[in-house]
Amino acid sequence: MWLFRSVVGKLWFTILLLVSCVLFVLTVLLLKFFENYYVQEAEKELTQLATKVSEVMRDYEDEKLARSIAWTLVDHTSKAVIITDSSHYWYSPTNDELRDLPLSLIEQDKDLRKVFTEGKSVKKKAYLPNVQIGKQYSDVIIVGVPLETANGKQGGVFIYQSLRAIEDTTRQTKKLIFLAAFIAIVLTTFFAFFLSTRITAPLRKMRQAAFEVARGKFDTKVPILTHDEIGELAMAFNQMGRRLQFNINALNQEKEQLASILSSMADGVITFNRDGEILITNPPAERFLQAWYFEQGNDAETIAPLPPQAKELFIRVVREEKEQSIELSLQGRTWVILMTPLYGKTNVRGAVAVLRDMTEERRLDKLRKDFIANVSHELRTPIAMLQGYSEAIIDDIAATDEEKKEMAKVIYDESLRMGRLVNDLLDLARMEAGHITLNYETVQLAPYIGRIIRKFQGLAKEKQIDLSAEFKNEDIQITIDPDRIEQVLTNLIDNAIRHTDQNGTVKIIAERSGDGVTIHVQDSGSGISEEDLPFVFERFYKADKARTRGRSGTGLGLAIAKNIVEAHKGTISVHSKLHEGTTFTFYLPNGPQKM
Protein backbone atom coordinates (compact mmCIF):
# COMPACT_ATOMS: atom_id res chain seq x y z
CA MET A 1 0.00 0.00 0.00
CA TRP A 2 3.05 2.27 0.05
CA LEU A 3 2.31 3.17 -3.58
CA PHE A 4 -0.98 4.82 -2.68
CA ARG A 5 0.67 6.86 0.08
CA SER A 6 2.81 8.68 -2.46
CA VAL A 7 1.87 11.34 -4.97
CA VAL A 8 3.17 9.14 -7.82
CA GLY A 9 0.84 6.28 -6.90
CA LYS A 10 -2.14 8.56 -6.47
CA LEU A 11 -1.56 10.31 -9.80
CA TRP A 12 -0.96 7.00 -11.57
CA PHE A 13 -4.09 5.43 -10.10
CA THR A 14 -6.19 8.52 -10.89
CA ILE A 15 -5.02 8.72 -14.51
CA LEU A 16 -5.35 4.95 -14.99
CA LEU A 17 -8.86 4.94 -13.52
CA LEU A 18 -9.86 7.86 -15.73
CA VAL A 19 -8.47 6.21 -18.89
CA SER A 20 -10.07 2.85 -17.94
CA CYS A 21 -13.48 4.47 -17.52
CA VAL A 22 -13.14 6.23 -20.86
CA LEU A 23 -12.01 3.03 -22.57
CA PHE A 24 -14.83 1.01 -20.99
CA VAL A 25 -17.50 3.45 -22.16
CA LEU A 26 -15.87 3.68 -25.56
CA THR A 27 -15.69 -0.13 -25.86
CA VAL A 28 -19.36 -0.56 -24.97
CA LEU A 29 -20.38 2.10 -27.46
CA LEU A 30 -18.15 0.69 -30.21
CA LEU A 31 -19.37 -2.86 -29.68
CA LYS A 32 -22.95 -1.70 -29.81
CA PHE A 33 -22.22 0.35 -32.87
CA PHE A 34 -20.45 -2.47 -34.70
CA GLU A 35 -23.14 -4.96 -33.75
CA ASN A 36 -25.88 -2.70 -35.09
CA TYR A 37 -23.80 -1.83 -38.09
CA TYR A 38 -23.19 -5.48 -39.02
CA VAL A 39 -26.85 -6.35 -38.50
CA GLN A 40 -27.98 -3.42 -40.65
CA GLU A 41 -25.50 -4.32 -43.37
CA ALA A 42 -26.65 -7.93 -43.26
CA GLU A 43 -30.29 -6.89 -43.47
CA LYS A 44 -29.48 -4.60 -46.36
CA GLU A 45 -27.60 -7.30 -48.25
CA LEU A 46 -30.31 -9.91 -47.59
CA THR A 47 -33.00 -7.47 -48.71
CA GLN A 48 -31.12 -6.80 -51.95
CA LEU A 49 -30.58 -10.52 -52.44
CA ALA A 50 -34.25 -11.32 -51.81
CA THR A 51 -35.28 -8.56 -54.21
CA LYS A 52 -33.01 -9.97 -56.93
CA VAL A 53 -34.39 -13.48 -56.39
CA SER A 54 -37.92 -12.06 -56.59
CA GLU A 55 -37.06 -10.28 -59.83
CA VAL A 56 -35.51 -13.42 -61.30
CA MET A 57 -38.64 -15.44 -60.49
CA ARG A 58 -40.75 -12.74 -61.99
CA ASP A 59 -38.71 -12.38 -65.20
CA TYR A 60 -38.46 -16.07 -66.14
CA GLU A 61 -41.56 -18.09 -67.06
CA ASP A 62 -39.62 -21.28 -66.57
CA GLU A 63 -39.79 -21.62 -62.83
CA LYS A 64 -37.15 -24.31 -62.73
CA LEU A 65 -34.69 -22.15 -64.64
CA ALA A 66 -35.58 -19.20 -62.51
CA ARG A 67 -34.93 -21.13 -59.32
CA SER A 68 -31.59 -22.39 -60.57
CA ILE A 69 -30.55 -18.83 -61.37
CA ALA A 70 -31.82 -17.66 -57.99
CA TRP A 71 -29.88 -20.33 -56.18
CA THR A 72 -26.72 -19.04 -57.75
CA LEU A 73 -27.35 -15.64 -56.23
CA VAL A 74 -27.61 -17.00 -52.70
CA ASP A 75 -24.16 -17.30 -51.04
CA HIS A 76 -23.07 -20.09 -48.73
CA THR A 77 -23.75 -18.14 -45.52
CA SER A 78 -27.44 -17.67 -46.30
CA LYS A 79 -30.39 -19.83 -47.20
CA ALA A 80 -33.47 -18.91 -49.23
CA VAL A 81 -37.00 -20.28 -49.45
CA ILE A 82 -39.31 -19.42 -52.37
CA ILE A 83 -43.01 -19.80 -51.71
CA THR A 84 -45.61 -19.49 -54.47
CA ASP A 85 -48.44 -20.93 -52.47
CA SER A 86 -48.94 -23.15 -49.48
CA SER A 87 -48.20 -26.29 -51.49
CA HIS A 88 -45.33 -24.99 -53.64
CA TYR A 89 -42.13 -23.86 -51.91
CA TRP A 90 -38.46 -24.54 -52.45
CA TYR A 91 -35.31 -24.24 -50.24
CA SER A 92 -31.93 -23.26 -51.60
CA PRO A 93 -29.34 -26.03 -51.48
CA THR A 94 -26.37 -23.68 -50.82
CA ASN A 95 -26.05 -24.12 -47.02
CA ASP A 96 -26.21 -27.58 -45.56
CA GLU A 97 -25.48 -26.44 -41.96
CA LEU A 98 -28.43 -24.07 -41.81
CA ARG A 99 -31.66 -26.09 -41.40
CA ASP A 100 -34.78 -25.32 -43.40
CA LEU A 101 -37.13 -22.65 -42.14
CA PRO A 102 -40.50 -24.31 -41.30
CA LEU A 103 -43.35 -23.05 -43.50
CA SER A 104 -45.66 -23.10 -40.50
CA LEU A 105 -43.43 -20.56 -38.76
CA ILE A 106 -43.79 -18.14 -41.67
CA GLU A 107 -47.54 -18.55 -41.83
CA GLN A 108 -47.99 -18.17 -38.06
CA ASP A 109 -45.67 -15.20 -37.53
CA LYS A 110 -47.69 -12.01 -37.88
CA ASP A 111 -44.69 -10.00 -39.11
CA LEU A 112 -43.62 -12.52 -41.75
CA ARG A 113 -47.22 -13.07 -42.82
CA LYS A 114 -47.40 -9.45 -43.98
CA VAL A 115 -45.45 -10.47 -47.10
CA PHE A 116 -48.48 -12.46 -48.25
CA THR A 117 -51.30 -10.39 -46.80
CA GLU A 118 -50.07 -6.88 -47.37
CA GLY A 119 -47.36 -7.38 -50.02
CA LYS A 120 -44.72 -5.67 -47.84
CA SER A 121 -41.06 -6.38 -47.33
CA VAL A 122 -40.27 -7.44 -43.78
CA LYS A 123 -37.15 -7.81 -41.69
CA LYS A 124 -37.02 -9.79 -38.53
CA LYS A 125 -34.34 -10.98 -36.11
CA ALA A 126 -35.48 -13.90 -34.06
CA TYR A 127 -34.36 -16.89 -32.10
CA LEU A 128 -35.77 -19.93 -33.80
CA PRO A 129 -35.43 -23.11 -31.77
CA ASN A 130 -36.47 -25.31 -34.67
CA VAL A 131 -33.67 -23.99 -36.86
CA GLN A 132 -30.24 -25.36 -36.14
CA ILE A 133 -26.75 -24.61 -37.33
CA GLY A 134 -25.08 -27.94 -37.00
CA LYS A 135 -25.83 -29.01 -33.45
CA GLN A 136 -26.42 -25.49 -32.03
CA TYR A 137 -29.36 -23.19 -32.11
CA SER A 138 -28.71 -19.63 -33.19
CA ASP A 139 -30.32 -16.27 -33.78
CA VAL A 140 -31.14 -15.59 -37.44
CA ILE A 141 -32.06 -12.63 -39.58
CA ILE A 142 -35.05 -13.22 -41.80
CA VAL A 143 -35.82 -10.95 -44.72
CA GLY A 144 -38.99 -11.45 -46.76
CA VAL A 145 -40.11 -9.72 -49.97
CA PRO A 146 -43.34 -10.28 -51.96
CA LEU A 147 -43.07 -12.44 -55.09
CA GLU A 148 -45.10 -12.28 -58.27
CA THR A 149 -44.16 -15.01 -60.75
CA ALA A 150 -44.37 -14.78 -64.54
CA ASN A 151 -47.44 -17.01 -64.37
CA GLY A 152 -49.18 -14.45 -62.18
CA LYS A 153 -48.88 -16.35 -58.89
CA GLN A 154 -48.50 -14.39 -55.60
CA GLY A 155 -45.95 -15.61 -53.08
CA GLY A 156 -42.84 -14.53 -51.26
CA VAL A 157 -39.12 -14.93 -51.09
CA PHE A 158 -37.56 -15.38 -47.65
CA ILE A 159 -33.82 -15.32 -47.10
CA TYR A 160 -32.40 -15.94 -43.67
CA GLN A 161 -28.91 -15.92 -42.35
CA SER A 162 -27.39 -16.95 -39.03
CA LEU A 163 -26.04 -14.21 -36.79
CA ARG A 164 -23.03 -16.38 -36.00
CA ALA A 165 -21.02 -14.63 -38.66
CA ILE A 166 -21.95 -11.29 -37.13
CA GLU A 167 -21.07 -12.64 -33.68
CA ASP A 168 -17.70 -13.84 -35.00
CA THR A 169 -17.06 -10.43 -36.48
CA THR A 170 -18.12 -8.77 -33.22
CA ARG A 171 -15.86 -11.13 -31.28
CA GLN A 172 -12.90 -10.21 -33.46
CA THR A 173 -13.78 -6.57 -33.02
CA LYS A 174 -13.85 -7.05 -29.22
CA LYS A 175 -10.44 -8.64 -29.34
CA LEU A 176 -9.06 -5.70 -31.30
CA ILE A 177 -10.72 -3.22 -28.94
CA PHE A 178 -9.43 -5.06 -25.85
CA LEU A 179 -5.96 -5.24 -27.36
CA ALA A 180 -6.10 -1.51 -28.09
CA ALA A 181 -7.35 -0.89 -24.54
CA PHE A 182 -4.51 -2.96 -23.06
CA ILE A 183 -1.95 -1.07 -25.12
CA ALA A 184 -3.59 2.21 -24.12
CA ILE A 185 -3.47 1.24 -20.42
CA VAL A 186 0.19 0.25 -20.70
CA LEU A 187 1.06 3.49 -22.46
CA THR A 188 -1.06 5.44 -20.00
CA THR A 189 0.76 3.79 -17.10
CA PHE A 190 4.10 4.63 -18.66
CA PHE A 191 3.21 8.24 -19.36
CA ALA A 192 1.44 8.57 -16.00
CA PHE A 193 4.56 7.43 -14.16
CA PHE A 194 6.68 9.66 -16.36
CA LEU A 195 4.42 12.65 -15.72
CA SER A 196 4.12 11.87 -12.02
CA THR A 197 7.88 11.54 -11.70
CA ARG A 198 8.41 14.83 -13.48
CA ILE A 199 5.93 16.47 -11.12
CA THR A 200 6.95 14.77 -7.91
CA ALA A 201 10.75 14.89 -8.37
CA PRO A 202 10.92 18.61 -7.50
CA LEU A 203 8.30 18.02 -4.80
CA ARG A 204 10.51 15.35 -3.22
CA LYS A 205 13.43 17.75 -3.32
CA MET A 206 11.27 20.40 -1.70
CA ARG A 207 10.24 17.88 0.96
CA GLN A 208 13.90 17.12 1.72
CA ALA A 209 14.65 20.84 1.79
CA ALA A 210 11.70 21.39 4.13
CA PHE A 211 13.10 18.78 6.53
CA GLU A 212 16.50 20.50 6.35
CA VAL A 213 14.86 23.85 7.12
CA ALA A 214 13.00 22.20 10.01
CA ARG A 215 16.42 21.10 11.37
CA GLY A 216 17.58 24.72 11.30
CA LYS A 217 19.49 24.79 7.97
CA PHE A 218 17.77 27.87 6.58
CA ASP A 219 20.30 28.30 3.76
CA THR A 220 18.99 25.14 2.02
CA LYS A 221 17.92 25.85 -1.58
CA VAL A 222 15.70 23.93 -3.99
CA PRO A 223 16.95 23.81 -7.62
CA ILE A 224 14.55 25.51 -10.04
CA LEU A 225 14.31 23.07 -13.00
CA THR A 226 11.14 24.35 -14.66
CA HIS A 227 9.32 27.63 -15.10
CA ASP A 228 5.81 26.34 -14.43
CA GLU A 229 3.84 26.36 -11.18
CA ILE A 230 6.28 23.88 -9.58
CA GLY A 231 9.20 26.11 -10.54
CA GLU A 232 7.39 29.08 -9.04
CA LEU A 233 6.74 26.99 -5.91
CA ALA A 234 10.47 26.20 -5.66
CA MET A 235 11.25 29.90 -6.11
CA ALA A 236 8.75 30.79 -3.37
CA PHE A 237 10.29 28.09 -1.12
CA ASN A 238 13.78 29.55 -1.60
CA GLN A 239 12.47 33.04 -0.87
CA MET A 240 10.75 31.69 2.23
CA GLY A 241 14.03 30.10 3.38
CA ARG A 242 15.92 33.35 2.87
CA ARG A 243 13.22 35.28 4.71
CA LEU A 244 13.26 32.78 7.56
CA GLN A 245 17.04 33.05 7.75
CA PHE A 246 16.77 36.84 7.84
CA ASN A 247 14.06 36.75 10.52
CA ILE A 248 15.94 34.18 12.63
CA ASN A 249 19.12 36.27 12.40
CA ALA A 250 17.15 39.36 13.35
CA LEU A 251 15.57 37.52 16.29
CA ASN A 252 18.98 36.20 17.39
CA GLN A 253 20.45 39.69 17.17
CA GLU A 254 17.58 41.10 19.19
CA LYS A 255 17.93 38.24 21.68
CA GLU A 256 21.69 38.80 21.99
CA GLN A 257 21.15 42.53 22.26
CA LEU A 258 18.52 42.02 24.96
CA ALA A 259 20.80 39.55 26.76
CA SER A 260 23.69 42.02 26.55
CA ILE A 261 21.50 44.82 27.87
CA LEU A 262 20.25 42.65 30.72
CA SER A 263 23.77 41.45 31.53
CA SER A 264 25.20 44.97 31.53
CA MET A 265 22.42 46.46 33.63
CA ALA A 266 23.40 47.49 37.13
CA ASP A 267 19.88 46.68 38.31
CA GLY A 268 18.58 43.15 38.59
CA VAL A 269 15.75 42.00 36.31
CA ILE A 270 13.49 38.99 36.91
CA THR A 271 10.64 37.96 34.59
CA PHE A 272 7.79 35.79 35.90
CA ASN A 273 4.98 33.91 34.19
CA ARG A 274 1.43 34.09 35.51
CA ASP A 275 2.08 31.23 37.94
CA GLY A 276 4.98 33.08 39.56
CA GLU A 277 7.70 30.90 38.03
CA ILE A 278 10.99 32.63 37.18
CA LEU A 279 11.65 32.80 33.42
CA ILE A 280 14.56 35.22 32.91
CA THR A 281 17.19 36.67 35.24
CA ASN A 282 20.35 38.73 34.82
CA PRO A 283 23.56 38.61 36.93
CA PRO A 284 22.49 41.19 39.58
CA ALA A 285 19.20 39.32 40.00
CA GLU A 286 21.15 36.07 40.31
CA ARG A 287 23.19 37.59 43.12
CA PHE A 288 19.96 38.62 44.85
CA LEU A 289 18.55 35.08 44.55
CA GLN A 290 21.82 33.51 45.71
CA ALA A 291 21.77 35.76 48.78
CA TRP A 292 18.19 34.64 49.49
CA TYR A 293 19.07 30.96 49.05
CA PHE A 294 22.15 31.34 51.27
CA GLU A 295 20.12 33.05 53.98
CA GLN A 296 17.49 30.28 53.86
CA GLY A 297 19.93 27.39 53.99
CA ASN A 298 21.66 27.27 50.58
CA ASP A 299 19.16 24.80 49.08
CA ALA A 300 17.31 26.32 46.14
CA GLU A 301 15.19 23.22 45.52
CA THR A 302 13.45 23.10 48.90
CA ILE A 303 12.80 26.79 49.58
CA ALA A 304 10.66 29.41 47.91
CA PRO A 305 12.24 31.08 44.85
CA LEU A 306 11.54 34.52 46.30
CA PRO A 307 11.24 36.14 49.73
CA PRO A 308 7.65 36.21 51.06
CA GLN A 309 7.46 40.00 50.64
CA ALA A 310 8.37 39.71 46.94
CA LYS A 311 5.87 36.86 46.47
CA GLU A 312 3.09 38.95 48.02
CA LEU A 313 4.14 41.84 45.78
CA PHE A 314 3.78 39.61 42.70
CA ILE A 315 0.30 38.49 43.80
CA ARG A 316 -0.79 42.13 44.23
CA VAL A 317 0.61 43.09 40.83
CA VAL A 318 -1.28 40.28 39.06
CA ARG A 319 -4.48 40.91 40.99
CA GLU A 320 -4.56 44.70 40.76
CA GLU A 321 -2.80 44.90 37.36
CA LYS A 322 -0.70 47.91 38.30
CA GLU A 323 2.85 48.72 39.37
CA GLN A 324 3.92 47.91 42.95
CA SER A 325 7.15 48.37 44.91
CA ILE A 326 8.69 47.32 48.22
CA GLU A 327 12.01 47.68 50.04
CA LEU A 328 13.61 44.79 51.90
CA SER A 329 16.95 43.91 53.52
CA LEU A 330 18.82 40.74 52.61
CA GLN A 331 22.27 39.67 53.86
CA GLY A 332 23.06 43.18 55.07
CA ARG A 333 22.10 44.82 51.77
CA THR A 334 19.05 46.93 50.99
CA TRP A 335 17.01 46.12 47.87
CA VAL A 336 14.14 48.04 46.29
CA ILE A 337 11.89 45.84 44.11
CA LEU A 338 9.75 47.56 41.49
CA MET A 339 7.35 45.11 39.84
CA THR A 340 5.22 45.82 36.75
CA PRO A 341 2.59 43.56 35.10
CA LEU A 342 3.23 42.09 31.65
CA TYR A 343 0.17 42.08 29.42
CA GLY A 344 -0.78 39.50 26.80
CA LYS A 345 -3.48 40.06 24.19
CA THR A 346 -6.34 39.99 26.69
CA ASN A 347 -4.98 39.61 30.22
CA VAL A 348 -1.88 39.72 32.42
CA ARG A 349 0.56 37.00 31.40
CA GLY A 350 3.18 37.63 34.06
CA ALA A 351 5.29 40.36 35.62
CA VAL A 352 8.76 41.87 35.42
CA ALA A 353 10.63 42.93 38.54
CA VAL A 354 13.49 45.43 38.64
CA LEU A 355 15.75 44.96 41.69
CA ARG A 356 17.86 47.94 42.62
CA ASP A 357 20.64 47.59 45.19
CA MET A 358 20.15 50.68 47.36
CA THR A 359 22.83 49.77 49.89
CA GLU A 360 25.28 52.41 48.66
CA GLU A 361 22.59 55.08 48.44
CA ARG A 362 21.38 54.30 51.93
CA ARG A 363 24.97 54.27 53.19
CA LEU A 364 25.66 57.63 51.53
CA ASP A 365 22.47 59.02 53.04
CA LYS A 366 23.67 57.82 56.44
CA LEU A 367 27.12 59.28 55.80
CA ARG A 368 25.61 62.64 54.86
CA LYS A 369 23.59 62.63 58.05
CA ASP A 370 26.59 61.47 60.06
CA PHE A 371 28.79 64.14 58.42
CA ILE A 372 26.77 66.93 59.98
CA ALA A 373 26.75 65.17 63.33
CA ASN A 374 30.49 64.42 63.14
CA VAL A 375 31.45 67.97 62.16
CA SER A 376 29.23 69.34 64.89
CA HIS A 377 30.75 66.93 67.38
CA GLU A 378 34.33 67.75 66.34
CA LEU A 379 33.71 71.51 66.46
CA ARG A 380 31.59 71.53 69.58
CA THR A 381 34.40 70.44 71.93
CA PRO A 382 37.05 73.03 70.89
CA ILE A 383 34.42 75.77 70.67
CA ALA A 384 33.18 74.91 74.15
CA MET A 385 36.73 74.93 75.47
CA LEU A 386 37.51 78.22 73.71
CA GLN A 387 34.36 79.73 75.14
CA GLY A 388 34.97 78.38 78.63
CA TYR A 389 38.61 79.40 78.95
CA SER A 390 38.02 82.80 77.33
CA GLU A 391 35.21 83.47 79.82
CA ALA A 392 37.54 82.41 82.62
CA ILE A 393 40.13 84.93 81.46
CA ILE A 394 37.52 87.67 81.09
CA ASP A 395 36.10 86.97 84.53
CA ASP A 396 39.61 86.99 86.04
CA ILE A 397 39.19 83.50 87.39
CA ALA A 398 42.90 82.86 86.78
CA ALA A 399 44.68 84.35 89.75
CA THR A 400 48.24 84.18 88.51
CA ASP A 401 49.94 84.85 85.23
CA GLU A 402 50.88 81.18 84.93
CA GLU A 403 47.24 80.14 85.08
CA LYS A 404 46.38 82.76 82.47
CA LYS A 405 49.19 81.49 80.22
CA GLU A 406 47.96 77.92 80.71
CA MET A 407 44.41 78.92 79.72
CA ALA A 408 45.73 80.88 76.75
CA LYS A 409 47.80 77.84 75.78
CA VAL A 410 44.62 75.66 75.81
CA ILE A 411 42.76 78.24 73.74
CA TYR A 412 45.67 78.34 71.29
CA ASP A 413 45.85 74.52 71.00
CA GLU A 414 42.10 74.24 70.43
CA SER A 415 42.21 76.96 67.80
CA LEU A 416 45.02 75.05 66.04
CA ARG A 417 42.90 71.91 66.26
CA MET A 418 39.93 73.71 64.68
CA GLY A 419 42.25 75.07 62.02
CA ARG A 420 43.55 71.58 61.22
CA LEU A 421 40.01 70.28 61.02
CA VAL A 422 38.92 73.05 58.69
CA ASN A 423 42.04 72.66 56.55
CA ASP A 424 41.52 68.91 56.33
CA LEU A 425 37.92 69.48 55.24
CA LEU A 426 38.99 71.98 52.60
CA ASP A 427 41.76 69.69 51.34
CA LEU A 428 39.40 66.74 51.15
CA ALA A 429 36.77 68.79 49.32
CA ARG A 430 39.35 69.99 46.76
CA MET A 431 40.63 66.44 46.25
CA GLU A 432 37.17 64.98 45.76
CA ALA A 433 36.37 67.80 43.30
CA GLY A 434 39.51 66.87 41.31
CA HIS A 435 41.35 70.12 42.06
CA ILE A 436 44.42 68.48 43.60
CA THR A 437 47.75 69.51 42.06
CA LEU A 438 50.70 67.12 42.19
CA ASN A 439 54.31 68.31 42.03
CA TYR A 440 56.25 65.28 40.84
CA GLU A 441 59.83 64.70 41.88
CA THR A 442 62.09 61.67 41.58
CA VAL A 443 63.11 60.50 45.03
CA GLN A 444 65.22 57.72 46.50
CA LEU A 445 62.73 55.74 48.52
CA ALA A 446 65.02 54.52 51.34
CA PRO A 447 66.23 57.95 52.63
CA TYR A 448 62.78 59.42 51.95
CA ILE A 449 61.02 56.91 54.21
CA GLY A 450 63.86 57.01 56.73
CA ARG A 451 63.39 60.79 57.14
CA ILE A 452 59.66 60.30 57.78
CA ILE A 453 60.29 57.55 60.34
CA ARG A 454 62.71 59.73 62.30
CA LYS A 455 59.85 62.18 62.99
CA PHE A 456 58.02 59.43 64.90
CA GLN A 457 60.99 57.86 66.72
CA GLY A 458 60.43 60.00 69.82
CA LEU A 459 56.76 59.05 70.05
CA ALA A 460 57.59 55.39 69.37
CA LYS A 461 60.25 55.28 72.10
CA GLU A 462 57.85 56.98 74.50
CA LYS A 463 55.33 54.14 73.92
CA GLN A 464 58.11 51.53 73.72
CA ILE A 465 57.13 50.59 70.16
CA ASP A 466 59.62 49.17 67.68
CA LEU A 467 59.35 51.41 64.56
CA SER A 468 61.41 50.18 61.58
CA ALA A 469 61.56 50.04 57.78
CA GLU A 470 62.36 47.17 55.41
CA PHE A 471 63.32 47.48 51.75
CA LYS A 472 63.10 44.33 49.69
CA ASN A 473 64.78 45.99 46.73
CA GLU A 474 67.82 48.25 46.80
CA ASP A 475 68.06 51.68 45.19
CA ILE A 476 64.34 52.10 44.59
CA GLN A 477 63.62 55.32 42.72
CA ILE A 478 60.14 56.62 41.99
CA THR A 479 58.60 59.80 40.66
CA ILE A 480 55.91 61.05 43.06
CA ASP A 481 54.72 64.16 44.85
CA PRO A 482 56.88 63.75 47.99
CA ASP A 483 54.89 66.18 50.14
CA ARG A 484 51.58 64.43 49.42
CA ILE A 485 52.96 60.92 49.91
CA GLU A 486 54.62 62.09 53.13
CA GLN A 487 51.16 63.19 54.26
CA VAL A 488 49.87 59.67 53.50
CA LEU A 489 52.74 57.93 55.34
CA THR A 490 52.51 60.34 58.26
CA ASN A 491 48.83 59.61 58.67
CA LEU A 492 49.26 55.83 58.43
CA ILE A 493 52.29 55.71 60.79
CA ASP A 494 50.59 58.00 63.29
CA ASN A 495 47.47 55.80 63.27
CA ALA A 496 49.59 52.66 63.65
CA ILE A 497 51.49 54.06 66.66
CA ARG A 498 48.36 55.41 68.33
CA HIS A 499 46.58 52.04 68.05
CA THR A 500 49.55 49.86 69.09
CA ASP A 501 50.17 48.99 72.72
CA GLN A 502 53.51 49.00 74.49
CA ASN A 503 56.19 46.59 73.23
CA GLY A 504 54.39 46.41 69.89
CA THR A 505 55.90 46.80 66.46
CA VAL A 506 55.26 49.09 63.50
CA LYS A 507 57.03 48.21 60.27
CA ILE A 508 57.12 49.95 56.87
CA ILE A 509 57.87 47.50 54.05
CA ALA A 510 58.67 48.79 50.56
CA GLU A 511 59.13 46.66 47.44
CA ARG A 512 59.26 47.14 43.72
CA SER A 513 56.03 46.08 41.98
CA GLY A 514 56.09 46.19 38.20
CA ASP A 515 56.72 49.75 37.12
CA GLY A 516 55.80 51.14 40.54
CA VAL A 517 56.24 50.61 44.26
CA THR A 518 54.10 48.87 46.87
CA ILE A 519 54.37 50.11 50.47
CA HIS A 520 52.97 48.24 53.50
CA VAL A 521 52.43 49.92 56.89
CA GLN A 522 52.12 47.01 59.29
CA ASP A 523 51.42 47.13 63.01
CA SER A 524 50.69 44.66 65.79
CA GLY A 525 48.03 46.81 67.38
CA SER A 526 44.42 46.31 68.36
CA GLY A 527 43.22 45.77 64.78
CA ILE A 528 39.94 46.76 63.16
CA SER A 529 36.74 44.78 63.47
CA GLU A 530 35.40 43.07 60.35
CA GLU A 531 32.26 45.21 60.34
CA ASP A 532 34.32 48.42 60.33
CA LEU A 533 36.79 47.45 57.58
CA PRO A 534 34.62 48.50 54.57
CA PHE A 535 34.20 52.03 55.98
CA VAL A 536 37.65 53.02 57.28
CA PHE A 537 38.30 55.28 54.27
CA GLU A 538 35.04 57.21 54.69
CA ARG A 539 35.03 60.75 56.07
CA PHE A 540 34.64 61.02 59.85
CA TYR A 541 34.33 57.26 60.19
CA LYS A 542 35.98 56.09 63.42
CA ALA A 543 36.37 52.57 64.64
CA ASP A 544 36.72 54.14 68.08
CA LYS A 545 33.05 54.77 68.76
CA ALA A 546 33.83 56.60 72.02
CA ARG A 547 35.85 59.24 70.08
CA THR A 548 38.45 59.39 72.80
CA ARG A 549 40.34 62.63 72.66
CA GLY A 550 44.02 62.33 72.05
CA ARG A 551 43.82 58.72 70.89
CA SER A 552 41.37 59.29 68.02
CA GLY A 553 41.80 61.83 65.24
CA THR A 554 39.24 63.74 63.19
CA GLY A 555 38.34 60.76 61.01
CA LEU A 556 39.54 62.55 57.84
CA GLY A 557 43.12 61.28 57.60
CA LEU A 558 42.39 57.99 55.81
CA ALA A 559 39.91 59.64 53.44
CA ILE A 560 42.59 62.21 52.52
CA ALA A 561 45.19 59.45 52.12
CA LYS A 562 42.96 57.52 49.80
CA ASN A 563 42.34 60.58 47.60
CA ILE A 564 46.08 61.33 47.42
CA VAL A 565 46.94 57.76 46.40
CA GLU A 566 44.15 57.70 43.79
CA ALA A 567 45.37 61.07 42.45
CA HIS A 568 48.70 59.28 41.81
CA LYS A 569 46.68 56.61 39.87
CA GLY A 570 47.40 54.14 42.64
CA THR A 571 45.34 51.94 44.94
CA ILE A 572 45.09 51.58 48.71
CA SER A 573 43.63 48.75 50.78
CA VAL A 574 43.55 47.47 54.35
CA HIS A 575 43.72 44.02 55.94
CA SER A 576 43.16 43.53 59.64
CA LYS A 577 42.22 41.06 62.34
CA LEU A 578 40.91 42.14 65.67
CA HIS A 579 43.65 42.07 68.40
CA GLU A 580 46.20 40.81 65.83
CA GLY A 581 47.16 43.94 63.96
CA THR A 582 46.48 45.93 60.81
CA THR A 583 48.27 46.30 57.49
CA PHE A 584 47.63 49.24 55.16
CA THR A 585 48.94 48.62 51.62
CA PHE A 586 49.13 51.18 48.85
CA TYR A 587 50.57 50.93 45.37
CA LEU A 588 52.12 53.93 43.55
CA PRO A 589 52.89 53.74 39.83
CA ASN A 590 55.91 55.60 38.53
CA GLY A 591 54.66 59.10 37.72
CA PRO A 592 55.65 61.36 34.79
CA GLN A 593 59.42 61.90 34.55
CA LYS A 594 60.57 65.38 35.40
CA MET A 595 62.37 67.06 32.48
Image (spheres, rainbow, N blue to C red):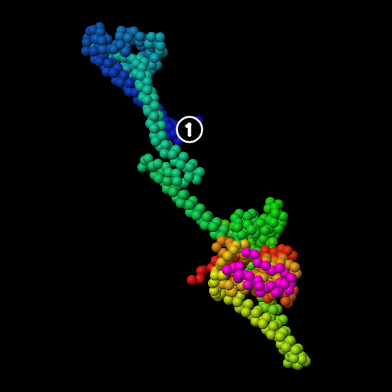
Q: Position of residue 164 (x, y in %)?
A: 36, 15
* Residue that appears at 64% across and 72% down: 452
Query: Does residue 532 appear left or right of residue 210 in this picture?
Result: right
Residue 443 drawn above or below residue 149: below
Horizontal placement of 71 versus 358: left or right? left
Residue at position x 64%, y 67% in the image = 360
Is 203 above or below relative to 429? above
Q: Main secondary structure of the magenta part?
A: helix
Position of residue 446 in the picture relative to residue 73 (left or right): right
- Image location of residue 238, percent across then percent down: 42, 46
Q: Position of residue 504 (x, y in %)?
A: 73, 67
Say whether residue 464 is magenta.
yes
Question: In the rendered structure, which segment of residues is drawn in magenta?
Answer: 444-471
121 magenta-colored:
no
Please identify the residue farthest to the top as the structure is shown. Answer: 64
Evaluate whether residue 90 shows in this view. Answer: no
Nearer to us in this view, 85 or 462: 462
Front residue of 547/184: it is 547
- Secondary structure under the numbered disc 1 in the rendered image: helix
According to the image, label 1 marks what residue? 4
Residue 129 visible to the viewer: yes
Residue at image point 64% right, 61% down: 317
251 w.r.t. 58: above or below: below
Amino acid type, callout 1:
Phe
